Amino acid sequence: MDIIHEGKVKRVFQEPDSPERVIIEFTDTVTAGDGKKRQVIEGKGELACRMSEYLFGYLEGKGIDTHYVKPLSGARLLCRKVAIYPIEVVCRNIAAGSFCRRYGLERGEPLRRPLVEFFVKDDSLHDPLIAKDSIILLGLLEEDVLQFMKSVTLSANYYLTELFRQQELTLVDFKLEFGSTKDGHVVLADELSGDTMRVWDNDSTSVDKDVFREDKGDLIEAYTQLVDSLKMTRPEDVSLRPETVKVIVDPKGGIKNPPGEVTKKALVRLGFSDVEEVRVGKIFKIQLKRPLTSEILNQLRMMSVKLLSNPISEKHEVSLD
Ligand code: TMP
Ligand code: ASP
């Protein structure tokens, strides 16, 4: 089999019979701190693979598109072939890890709401935190892809948090990667395991890679506990979370906008003499039955052109924030 990519802990092979499929193999290597700390722990790859298989399958079942297709023997998964975006997306519910170091917080401080952060996927730069505006300015992602990733990350956070909660485990934070399929769909990719998330049990004990990062126990024991807990979850008990998106309809400049003219006159009459021009648009808040996918995003664009806006006199924008 041809190897397409060799990462620190996974290998990606071309599936010989299908150009749009790859085989991802999870190795027993575990690394931390940009690979500075490294060890081979027998059985780790198989456990990380089983977690990824379970969690990708679960998220697919809730309507989130992923690269996962099916399990293969050994520590391997059959996946859709994607081009991975150069941004890692981290979602945090509780302060831990680099968030505590960066802002001087205590480990374990709950965050008021889930926080989504973006990092550049580049070990030679030590995966730096990056602002959304910088991502756009540097051309690392298109704005709509960035918004889409954030929206999917928050949905995944809800579904994963609820699943772990069933086993009295707390999802502290996790990292996601996204990729684009040949037909342009943006899907969740890479892995979802103890290697890429922090999970605490009742007394805030880590059952994730922090066991290895901080030398605080047996990683295989922790990962086995996670896999066994996942097997006991009931995905069907986690209810679907309604998603809200906005379509913003913005009147184009240079075209008469009578409601805007009326509003402007009224404002000036009230004494707001600095108002030069007003244009009135519309915002549609649309509640979806299931998480956002690239396909639904395309449908929203079609709705905007066909019904929600008049493409001759108005611009439209799908906003996921
Ligand atoms: P951090 O606190 O080190 O920034 O990590 C946040 C989450 O992201 C944590 O669950 C571990 C995960 N993560 C990765 O999966 N890969 C990485 O390279 C880093 C830095 C973090
Ligand atoms: N820095 C990553 C982590 O600690 C892994 C690595 O860089 O080797 O999760």
Image (cartoon, grey):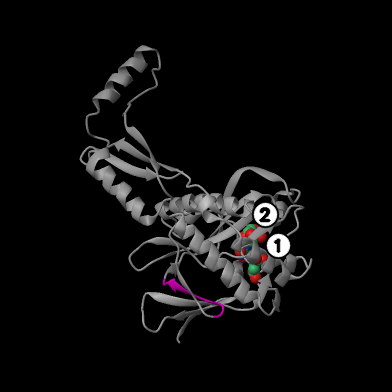
Is 188 above or below relative to 265?
Answer: below
Can residue 127 be seen in the rendering of this structure?
no
Residue 98 left/right relative to 311: right
The residues tagged by marks 2 and 1 sit, at their Cα atoms, a distance apart of: 9 Å
Instruction: Say which element carries label 1.
Output: loop
Q: Closest to the observer: 97 or 66?
A: 66
Looking at the rendered structure, the kind of residue marked 2 is Leu
Furthest-left residue in view?
312
Residue at 28% x, 19% y: name it. 262
Residue 307 left/right relative to 126: left
Q: Closest to the observer: 257 or 274?
A: 257
Residue at 42% x, 69% y: name it. 82
Q: Closest to the observer: 52 or 130?
A: 52
Residue at 70% x, 73% y: name it. 36
Residue 269 left/right relative to 235: left
Ligand 1 within 8 Å of the CB at mark 1: no
Callout 1 environment at 10 Å: few (<14), some (14 to 19), or many (20+)? many
Ligand 1 within 8 Å of the CB at mark 2: no
Question: Which range is magenta?
Answer: 74-81
Percent position of residue 175, x then y: 58, 60
Residue identified by numbered label 1:
207
Can residue 80 be seen in the rendering of this structure?
yes
Instruction: Say which element carries label 2.
Output: loop
- Quadrant in the picture for residue 258: top left
Looking at the rendered structure, the kind of residue marked 1 is Val
